[in-house]
Image (cartoon, grey):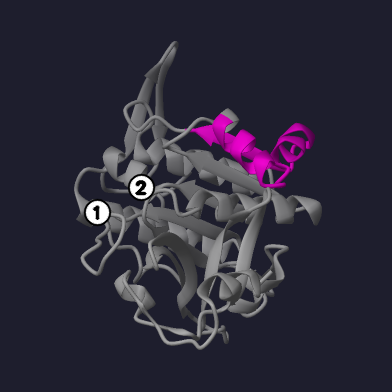
Amino acid sequence: MSPFRGGYHDYAIRTGGIEVYPRLVAAEYRTSATRQKMASGITEIDSLLGGGIEQGTSTLIAGAAGTGKSTLAAQFAAAAATRGEKSAVFVFDESPLTLTTRAAQLGIDLSSAVENGTVAIRQVDPAELSPGEMTHAIRVAVERDNVKLVVIDSLNGYLNAIPEERFLSIQLHELLTYLGQRNVATILVAAHSGLIGSQMSSPVDASYLADAVVLVRYFEARGEIRQALSVMKKRGSRHERTIREFGFDDGRIFVGAALREFRGILTGVPVYEGDGDLVHQRSSGD
């Protein structure tokens, strides 16, 4: 007989009865396993991350709208599929068709991975799916389908299902602890409000929960809006501390050399201190 579990539990009323989703208690799932690197397949991104993300860890990809956060998460899922590892992608902000179409335009073949079952994409409507039901869906993906990577895109959408941030933090902590103990890598996507400048903020701060934080942001350079990528934090392993240019060129993800000629990139309006032409500096990272 199962032990009594106190607290609040989500449930759904369905044809034939009620389905209850017991509150997740991560401590019940302690396991030990070797944590392997999970590369993105893009050399420069993996260099920034010290070889990639690790199994059993969580990575937060944060930035303004349109900076490529979802695309970067999709790249990790597609790379895992090429290794035969399964991924589950939960999208709040767009349809699976939109995600796979956008990815295909950048040479990321999610569609084939969906067809062969190595990537499962589920669109989530927070008005219809409670946090407990979503946690149950993630557990099914991990325990039944042997998923090795879980992507939640985005935390902003997840917040709509849990209006109070303190409850979101509790839910996320238990979920990330559970996934870590199951040796599953997690990617969380979070959108900042605002587009450029030092006053950008996120509606929910999950940076302290994540093992690694990847920041993607816009910056201005001589009348042109460009993007930069950096790893702000990574627990447990070394990582590159440079800031690299990031974007999309000629139907692929572009990651340039370290932006050493700039000072103040994270302010959004940096100062160029290089000797060469600025346009040439960009192309030199190809």
Give whichever of discs 1 and 2 has the lower sequence position: 2
Split into 4 quadrants, where in the image is the C terminus? bottom right
Q: Which residues are magenta?
A: 98-123
- For disc 2, the marked residue is 4
Q: With 268 as the anchor, is 199 left or right in this view?
A: left
What number is the disc on residue 272? none
Q: SS at mark 1?
A: loop
Residue 62 placement (x, y as % from top left): 40, 60
Residue 219 placement (x, y as % from top left): 38, 66
Question: From this viewpoint, is residue 177 visible?
Answer: no
- For disc 1, the marked residue is 203
Residue 81 placement (x, y as % from top left): 75, 50
Q: Amino acid at mark 2?
A: Phe
Q: Is residue 12 above or below residue 257?
A: above
Q: With 259 as the anchor, is 218 left or right in this view?
A: left
- Decide: marks 1, 2 in contact (CB < 8 A)? no
Which quadrant of the structure image shows residue 47?
bottom right
Residue at 49% across, 59% down: 178
Q: CA distance from mark 1 to mark 2?
A: 35 Å
Q: Nearest the camera: 172 or 182?
A: 172
Q: Which class describes the residues within 10 Å of circle 2: few (<14), some (14-19), or many (20+)?
A: few
Which quadrant of the structure image shows residue 173?
bottom left
Residue at 41% across, 47% down: 154
Question: From this viewpoint, is residue 59 visible?
Answer: yes
Q: Nearer the viewer, mark 1 or mark 2?
A: 1
Residue 112 placement (x, y as % from top left): 77, 37
Is 108 magenta? The answer is yes
Q: With 224 as the anchor, is 33 left or right in this view?
A: right
Q: Amino acid at mark 1?
A: Pro
